[in-house]
Image (cartoon, helix red, strand yellow):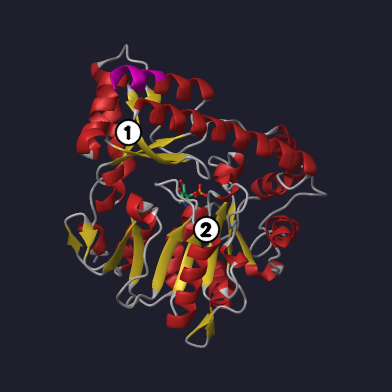
Amino acid sequence: MVNPNFAKMQANYLFSTVRQKTNEYVAAHPEAKILRLGIGDVTRPLVPEVIKAMHAAVYEMGDIATFKGYGEDFGYRFLREAIVANDYAPLGVTLTVDEVFVNDGAKSDTGNIGELFDVSCVVAVCDPVYPVYVDSNAIAGRAGEPTGDTWSRLVYMPCVAENGFVPELPKEHVDLIYLCYPNNPTGAHATYDQLRMWVDYALKTGAVILYDAAYSSFIGEGLPRSIYEIEGAKGCAIEFKSYSKTAGFTGVRCGYTVIPAELKRDGQSLNAMWKRRQNTKFNEASYISQRAAAAIYTPEGKRQTAEVTAYYKKNARIIREGLQSIGFEVYGGENAPYIWLRTPNGMKSWDFFDQLLDRAQVVGTPGSGFGPHGEGYFRLTSFGTLEMSTEALERIRKVF
Ligand code: PLP
C-alpha cells in the first residue's frame, strides 16, 4: 500500500505550473523574449574565491594522500567552526560545533525536520507560505484533509499588508510554528520585538519554532539576523540557513541547520534525535561543496559574496522603486530579494500572471500559489540580471 497522503496533494507544484504556462506561451510565440522573474533561482556565477576552493578540493580528491571518502558526521569541522565563528559569534550568539548540522541545502532539512515530531502535533504556518512546510507536513499525515486550497489540520496565520506580513499569535494551541524571515514570498522581515513576541510565546506554550533564515544575507542594519539573538530562543527554536542565496549555491548544494543542545521536548534532546536521524538517513554534503562553503568565510570570500548580494539588492531597489513610481502598491525588496506587489484593481493573482506574460512577456509568481492570503498579490524576484530587471520594469511601465 502506498502513502495515501500523496493522493490528497495538489497534482501541480506552484512552480511547475508557472513553468508549464510559460512554456505554452513560448511555444505559441516563439519570437517572444521572455524575462523570467518568477522562480527564485540566482543568476550570478560563483565568486572566484569559491571557485578556487572548489578546484583545490577537486585536486585533493584526485590524490591518494588527500582523497576524502565519506565525510565527518554532521559536516566537516572546518566548516562548522567557520559557521560558529562568522555567522553567530559576531551577533553575540554562542554556539558549539555540535549544535550545527551541515546539509545539502535548506530544502532538505525544512522538509525533513518534521520527522522529529509526533504526527498529532498541530502545525502553524504563515499564509502565504513557502510550500515546502505545508507539503512536507501533508506527506507526513500531519496536515489532515485538503479543503480547497488549505488543509484541515493546519493553522494558517494570515500575513497581509495590514499586519506588516508578520502574523499575530494563534488563538488555538499549536505545537510547531514555521516562521521565515526575510520572508519568501512577501519579502518582509521581522523586527527584534516581533521575534521576541514569538519566542516568548513558544517558551510559554512549549511550541517549537522552525525558523527559516535562508535569506539572511539580505538583512540590513538594525534587524535580527538569527532567531538566537532573542533571549531564550535556544530553548524553543531550530534555525535553517542556506548558501543558495548567500553565495549562489543553488546548483552546488550546501546549507546548515542549528539545533541548540538545550532544546528539549518530552525530556528528549532534539539535537540528539536529529543526530540519530542524520546518521541513519544522510551522508553529508560533498567535501567539494563544504570546501566551497568555507571559502565564503575568508576575507576575500566575504567581500566577493557581499558584492553579489549588493547586486541583487540593487535589482530589488530598481524594481521596487520603479513599480512604486508607476503607482503599484509594493512591499518587500529591502531586506529580501523578493518584491511583493498588490495586483492592480483587485485582479486575481493568476489573471495578473497571464496579463504580465501576454502583454509584457514578464514571468512572475502569483501570490495565491503561496496560500489563500496571497490572492491579489504577486511576487517578482531580484535574482535576475540587472539588464533583465531594468527591462522588465520598462515593459511593465509601458503596459500599465
Ligand atoms: N527556504 C526558503 C524560504 C526558500 O525560499 C528556499 C529556496 O528557494 C529554501 C529554503 C531552499 O533553499 P536551498 O537551495 O538551500 O535548498
In the displayed orientation, state which residue is furthest to the left: 148
Relative to 143, does residue 245 appear above or below in the rendering?
above
User: Residue at 47% of width from left, 65% of height from top?
Assistant: 210
Between 365 and 200, the one nearer to me in the picture: 200
147 left or right, relative to 244:
left
> Bounds of the magenta span?
394-400
Q: On the image, which quarter does residue 300 sit in?
A: top right
Between 159 and 107, the one nearer to me in the picture: 159
In the displayed orientation, state which residue is furthest to the right: 65
Which SS class for mark 2? loop
Three-letter amino acid code at the position of disc 1:
Arg
User: Residue at 60% of width from left, 79% of height from top?
Assistant: 262
Which SS class for mark 1? helix
Residue 118's disc number: none
Between 313 and 327, the one nearer to me in the picture: 327
| Residue at image mark 1 | 19
Q: Is residue 106 magenta?
A: no
| Residue at image mark 2 | 191
Residue 94 in picture, x, y percent from top left = 71, 68
81 left or right, relative to 34:
right
Marks 1 and 2: which is nearer the front?
Answer: 2
Relative to 43, does residue 229 appear above or below in the rendering?
below
Q: Is mark 2 within 8 Å of ligand 1?
A: no
Residue 272 in picture, x, y percent from top left = 58, 77
Question: Do the CB atoms of the residues marked 1 and 2 lie less than 8 Å apart?
Answer: no
Three-letter amino acid code at the position of disc 2:
Thr
Residue 308 in picture, x, y percent from top left = 62, 34
Q: Is residue 397 magenta?
A: yes
